[in-house]
Amino acid sequence: MVQSSKQIDPCMQILSLDNAIRFAGRIKDRKLISFARRPNATPLLDEELSNMIHYQTSLKTSWEDMFNNTLGKTNWMITSKEKVKLITLFLDDGLLIISTRSTSNHDTIIKKIQSLNIKF
């Protein structure tokens, strides 16, 4: 069973792609609007820190926009930490954020997500 909130189907679909995926969420206008978490994945951050990391992700991605004209549109970003990998996929109207085990194959996970052609 998956813990979820609001629009659950796309996030739950993403969780089902790979057992290494701990969390999938959708950010729009710098706010988490939907998510699903694997039930056996204990949150590593409390609610306040979770909100801060979602906001930080939004800010980091907004910096990418200034380079779009010269370097092209950003497709995704990854942050590799000791305990998790944080994957951010750029959508037309927001972000898809994924947390995985640190040992996950992020390239494979990103390709699986992109192959879904999910509409949020």
Image (cartoon, grey):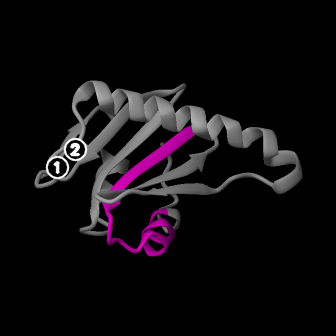
Q: Residue 35: horizontal and vertical position, in percent?
A: 32, 40
Residue at (52%, 64%) from the top-left corner?
114
Q: Which residue is mark 1?
A: 2
Q: Which quadrant of the structure image shows residue 92?
A: top right
The three-letter amino acid code for the residue at tag 1 is Val
Q: Amino acid at mark 2?
A: Leu
> Left of 60 or right of it: where is 19?
left
Q: Residue at x 64, y 56 (%)?
A: 75
Which quadrant of the figure has residue 51? top left
Along the viewing direction, whichever of 89 and 46 lies nearer the viewer: 46
Q: Secondary structure beneath disc 1?
A: loop
Left or right: 38 with respect to 13?
left
Mark 2 Cα within 10 Å, few/some/many (few <14, many 20+)? few
Residue 82 as seen in the image, left or right of residue 113: left
| In the image, residue 69 above or below residue 114 | above
115 w.r.t. 96: above or below:
below
Give the magenta part as a residue range.
94-113
Query: Residue at left 47%, top 35%?
Result: 27
- Tell me what residue is drawn at x 80 percent, y 47 percent: 68
Tell me the tag on residue 44. 2
Helix or strand or loop: what does disc 2 sit on? Answer: loop
Residue placed farthest to the right in the image?
A: 70
Question: In the rendering, which numbered label is found on residue 92?
Answer: none
**Residue 84: quarter of image:** bottom left
Tell me which label, 2 or 1, sits earlier in the chain.
1
Distance Cα–Cα, label 2 vs label 1: 17 Å
